[in-house]
């Protein structure tokens, strides 16, 4: 017989005040690792930013101290220090000890803000071993300290979370620790995260803090944010201040050459919602209120296919989107689809319809809305849930975008035409890739007629073991044919330097013979429609000459892969062959046959010659210097570059996509000045003897 378990009222737990936060921290900050630790910092920073949004603060300072504490200071109005009548506590103590308490519940102190739930500061306090709050108001500097959410006094003059702590009596007044000049106000919060709560490896990421500060400075024009890291041997400080707002932000985020300038879309709409409103007696009652939703969007299209869209509500990032982002994307697709259909004959669009991915390709956008008391899904505020935002954003974007696309102004007309041509080219590319995927599979020897005539196919049908060598020129192709293993090594020659796709449009890329042939041979599509599972080869090897032209061709090919076949690079399936630079024939005395050694750099050649001299061995003069693959015979090319048993391959990796974007844009983009500066700076390290004269 099953044993009965008792369950009655005495088994129920009632957590008072901040106990619930310490018991279930993940409910409030998401996790107790570095992500949760950073979320606590965002809560404190956002309070300062809300003061700036309300027009009361112009500077914010963030300092990472060597003792693992963090300090956030602003020149806002300062947290109220007078007595809150219902609790009998100072405003400062209420903010840091009471959940759902603050000035952002419709009392008129704030309008559109990021802090809404009244739990941010109190949650950070509950999860801190020590928190010191200092407020400057009314010519005085007030201070209150907390230990794991409880107000009191720490012993000693040096701030230390382990110092002896004396809890304060209930309702005790704040300490006045200094005087301030007339009109000077502000708040400074310094806290030490509680290691009883957070994991041992949780820490503050200075790069993430700098990115967040930069992002906030873009969203609040004129706000000056200073980030100082004192944890290293030398303090590091960065200052962020931008007056261009989200237009400058969109320009900063964009990594490819532009098709359009930054387009700014602004508007607003009203909606009503039924919400609980606090009365003077502290009770709430339902009331219909009218809200205003302000929409501000900066967007531009570039020549690439990557999409970068950042969305914000009252400057709080919503990385998972929400109703405002849904409205933006719907309006974008509807407006462009309508305009393309109206100009289908001129654009040669046929009867096919645009899809969302066609419109978003190459788009960089910053979408911001400002709403009083927005509805978020959860305390982490990653998704906006206010239903009316979708319709308002959609209406504003549709009206402004359709007006821009139909504008007769010369500049607007040219850019609108470029955008329409781009999205139609993306649509055609998607349809072409889909048809190719449906009809093209790996061909056997009798089915190769659809492939470029210059492709030298291999016999193997298995993808994993096959290799495609992209060789430079017909002379190298002739040698490579004899050097390859025809079972698993295929060859595709390219003539000269292919199109620089960093500068060219999608349509130009697809119409380029060499680029189109390469996409067709790999057989997995391009851009957003690229399907790595459909790729016909396990490895792609770029085999170019070991000279300046060869390096340039390799860079052009890598630009094509990075821009339109990036999954191949991310999967580690793109390689660069490493052909030797020198062939040294070592003369052995007597009947012993001469030995051939290959070197791959000038330094390696010098080391080899020094070793031979030390061993008193001679070598044939002159030493052969390979300037092209065509100078090798088949045996030499096979042994040094193509035979898996002996060759060396350099795997192409992308560890940091954003850094790679910047490098490709610098080296291959349409803006010349930064590239010129880069070349001039690098010329100092150039060895002139390496230049072939």
Image (cartoon, rainbow, N blue to C red):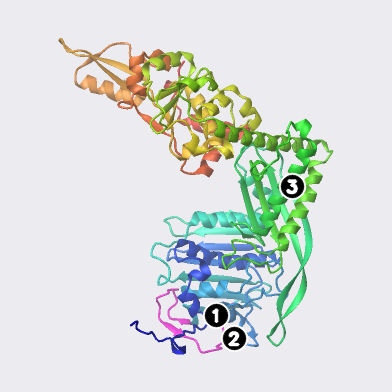
Q: CA distance from mark 1 to mark 3?
A: 49 Å
The answer to whether 44 appears left or right of 368 in the picture is left
- Residue 604 visible in image: yes
Above or below: residue 56 compared with residue 287: above
The stretch drawn in magenta includes residue 162: yes
Q: Residue shown at 44%/55% (left/top)?
A: 234
Callout 1: helix, strand or loop?
Answer: helix
- Few, some or many residues within 10 Å of mark 3 (<14, 14–19, 20+): some
Disc 2 secondary structure class: strand
Q: Is residue 503 a member of the stretch shown in magenta?
A: no
- Which circle's residue, 3 or 2, is located before the other in the chain? 2
Give the image quarter of residue 515.
top right
Q: Looking at the picture, tell me which residue is in the foreground, 465 or 3.
A: 3
Give the residue displayed 69% in from the left and 73% down from the top. Answer: 183
x, y percentage for residue 137?
A: 64, 76
Crowd class of label 2 (few under 14; some 14 to 19; many from 20; radius 10 Å):
some
Earlier in the chain: of badge 2 and badge 1, it is 2
Which quadrant does the N terminus fall into?
bottom left
Q: 509 and 202: which one is in front?
A: 509
Q: CA distance from mark 2 to mark 1?
A: 10 Å
Q: Main secondary structure of the magenta part?
A: loop
What is the x, y in percent for residue 615?
19, 21
Contact (CB < 8 A) between labels 2 and 1? yes
Identify the element where label 3 is drawn. Answer: helix
> Residues at badges 3 and 2 in contact (C-beta under 8 Å)?
no
Q: Which residues are magenta?
A: 152-178
Q: Which residue is mark 1?
A: 97
Query: Circle 3 is placed at which residue position?
Result: 334
């Amino acid at each position: 017989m099953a044993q009965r378990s008792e369950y009655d009222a005495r088994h129920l737990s009632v957590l008072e005040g901040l106990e619930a936060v310490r018991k279930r921290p993940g409910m409030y900050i998401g996790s107790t690792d570095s992500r949760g630790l950073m979320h606590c910092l965002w809560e404190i920073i956002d309070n300062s930013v809300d003061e700036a949004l309300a027009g009361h603060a112009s500077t914010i300072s963030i300092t990472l101290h060597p003792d693992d504490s963090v300090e956030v200071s602003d020149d806002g109005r300062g947290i109220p220090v007078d007595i809150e009548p219902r609790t009998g506590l100072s405003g400062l103590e209420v903010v840091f000890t009471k959940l759902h308490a603050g000035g952002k519940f419709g009392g008129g102190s704030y309008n559109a803000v990021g802090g809404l739930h009244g739990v941010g500061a109190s949650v950070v306090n509950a999860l801190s071993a020590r928190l010191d709050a200092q407020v400057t108001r009314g010519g005085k500097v007030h201070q209150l300290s907390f230990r794991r959410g409880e107000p009191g006094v720490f012993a000693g003059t040096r701030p230390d979370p382990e110092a002896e702590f004396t809890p304060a009596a209930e309702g005790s007044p704040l300490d006045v620790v200094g005087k301030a000049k007339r009109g000077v106000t502000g708040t400074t919060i310094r806290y030490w995260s509680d290691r009883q709560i957070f994991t041992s490896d949780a820490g503050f990421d200075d790069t993430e803090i700098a990115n967040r500060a930069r992002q906030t400075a873009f969203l609040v024009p004129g706000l000056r944010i200073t980030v100082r890291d004192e944890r290293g041997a030398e303090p590091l400080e960065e200052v962020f201040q931008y007056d261009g707002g989200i237009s400058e932000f969109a320009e900063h985020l964009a990594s490819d050459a532009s098709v359009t300038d930054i387009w700014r879309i602004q508007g607003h709409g009203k909606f009503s919602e039924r919400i609980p409103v606090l009365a003077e007696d502290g009770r709430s009652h339902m009331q219909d209120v009218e809200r205003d939703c302000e929409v501000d969007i900066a967007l531009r299209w570039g020549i690439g296919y990557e999409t970068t869209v950042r969305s914000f509500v009252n400057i709080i990032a919503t990385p998972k989107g929400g109703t405002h982002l849904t409205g933006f994307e719907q309006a974008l697709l509807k407006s462009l689809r309508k305009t393309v259909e109206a100009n289908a004959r001129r654009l040669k669009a046929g009867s096919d319809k645009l899809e969302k991915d066609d419109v978003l390709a190459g788009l960089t956008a910053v979408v911001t809305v400002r709403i009083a008391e927005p509805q978020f899904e959860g305390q982490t505020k990653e998704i906006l849930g206010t239903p009316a935002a979708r319709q308002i954003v959609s209406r504003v974007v549709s009206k402004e975008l359709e007006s821009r696309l139909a504008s007769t102004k010369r500049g607007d007309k040219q850019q609108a035409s470029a955008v329409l041509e781009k999205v139609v080219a993306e649509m055609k590319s998607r349809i072409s890739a889909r048809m190719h995927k449906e009809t093209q599979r790996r061909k056997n020897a009798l089915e190769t007629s659809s492939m470029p005539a210059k492709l030298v196919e291999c016999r193997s049908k298995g993808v994993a073991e096959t290799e495609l060598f992209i060789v430079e020129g017909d002379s190298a192709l002739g040698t490579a044919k004899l050097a390859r293993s025809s079972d698993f090594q295929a060859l595709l020659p390219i003539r000269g330097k292919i199109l620089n796709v960093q500068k060219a449009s999608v349509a130009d890329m697809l119409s380029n013979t060499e680029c189109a042939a390469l996409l067709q041979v790999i057989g997995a599509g391009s851009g957003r429609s690229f399907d790595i599972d459909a790729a016909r080869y396990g490895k792609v090897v770029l085999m170019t000459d070991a000279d300046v032209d060869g390096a340039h061709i390799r860079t052009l090919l890598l630009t094509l892969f990075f821009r339109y076949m990036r999954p191949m690079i991310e999967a580690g399936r793109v390689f660069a062959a490493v052909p030797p630079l020198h062939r040294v024939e070592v003369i052995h005395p007597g009947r012993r046959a001469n030995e051939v050694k290959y070197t791959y750099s000038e330094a390696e050649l010098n080391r080899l010659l020094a070793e031979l001299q030390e061993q008193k061995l001679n070598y044939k003069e002159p030493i052969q210097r390979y300037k092209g693959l065509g100078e090798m015979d088949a045996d030499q090319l096979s042994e040094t570059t193509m035979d898996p048993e002996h060759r060396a391959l350099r795997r192409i990796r992308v560890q940091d996509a954003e850094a790679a974007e910047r490098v490709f844009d610098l080296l291959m983009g349409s803006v010349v000045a930064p590239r010129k500066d880069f070349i001039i700076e690098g010329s100092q390290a150039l060895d002139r003897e390496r230049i072939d004269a």
